[in-house]
Amino acid sequence: MGLQQFLIIGAILFFIGLFGAFTKRNTIVVLMCIELMFNAVNLTAVAMSRYVVPYNNNHGVLIPETILTGHIFSIFIITIAAAEIAIGLAIVIALVRNYKSVFISDAKELKH
Amino acid sequence: METDTAFIIDVVFWIIAVCTIFSAIAVVFLRDVFRSALFLVVTFIGVAGMFLLLRAEFLAMVQILLYVGAIAVLILFAVVLTRDVEQGSPFNGYIAPALVISGLILAGVIFVIINTDWNMTSGEIGSEELTFAFSETNIVGNIAELLIKKYVLAFEAVSIVLLGAVIGALAIVRRR
């Protein structure tokens, strides 16, 4: 168990999320895959924060500001993810109401 | 005794890793949206376990509360609310190109991860000192202090984003 293992698992999670977001037709599943990618990024940020210190000018002295950078990043990403999923699911509900379908390919009013 | 603990932690890590990745695969490949959502919950819990292994206890709790508690319930609600229309989660016709593109990205990222020398932390700080610093630091208190001191502008901005998102979601789903 080290930094590389965590980074590789984050990369695999991101790959699965990216593949799903590319290939699924159901809007809810696409949103789930985007959440998977957010989780992969969070995992990577926290792993970096645990094993690699960003450069600071306090020579040799570790202060919380430097070792908790990834945690702060992760908190902001989680907040943005919550906002994104709220908007996304509202759009799904609106889609279902207007087009009677949850499939992305059925929302093509602006396509032509 | 030391090696025993390290070995057990390694085993726990690999169990969590395998569960997380298999449930993530299940999210993409299952045909039923409801089951996909349930496997998404398993993935979130697995990532929370990884946070625990990375000494990010506060983030693990936030992950459980926000993702498992709020976002998963929101997704399940959306699945249930759209039950009366055509359901299921089929693939579109772009499986092969998507697999090639995302596989190339994955291969590149893993190549870079493996071929980078991660032993440099920053100059004179060694990894043992970093581990020691993590066991000595009051993580929750310091995160709170950083959020209201150094990162206060980002904190306020993100609260406004969240407020806008809630109002926007309400405006979108409102019946006219």
Image (cartoon, rainbow, N blue to C red):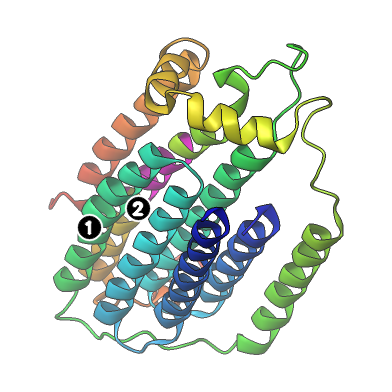
Please state the horizontal and vertical placement of residue B115, each as a whole percent of the image.
87, 60
Residue at screen point 65% across, 55% down: A2
Please state the horizontal and vertical placement of residue A83, each as a whole percent of the image.
35, 43
Q: Is residue B144 above or below residue B97?
A: above
Q: Secondary structure at mark 1?
A: helix
Q: Chain of mark 1?
A: B
Could you tell me the amino acid type at mark 1? Answer: Leu
Q: Chain of mark 2?
A: A
Could you tell me the amino acid type at mark 2? Answer: Ile
Please state the horizontal and vertical placement of residue A50, each as a whole percent of the image.
60, 40
Q: Secondary structure at mark 2?
A: helix
Question: What is the spatial separation of the Cα atoms under label 1 and label 2, in whole angstroms?
Answer: 8 Å
**Front residue of this view, candidates A25 and A62:** A62
Bounds of the magenta segment: A76-86
**Front residue of this view, candidates B107 and B91:** B107
Cβ–Cβ under 8 Å for marks 1 and 2:
yes
Residue at screen point 77% across, 72% down: B107
Q: Is residue A68 visible?
A: no
Q: Is residue B147 above or below residue A91?
A: above
**Front residue of this view, candidates B108 and B101:** B108
Look at the magenta stretch and give its main secondary structure.
Answer: helix
Residue, disc 2:
A85
Please state the horizontal and vertical placement of residue B112, each as a whole percent of the image.
82, 59
Q: Quadrant of residue B62?
A: top left
Residue B166 — which label?
Answer: none
Q: Quadrant of residue A90?
A: bottom left
Residue, disc 1:
B74
Q: Is residue B49 above or below residue B166?
A: below
Q: Is residue A77 magenta?
A: yes
Residue at screen point 52% across, 70% down: B14
Badge 1: how crowded within 10 Å, few (<14), some, or many (20+)? some
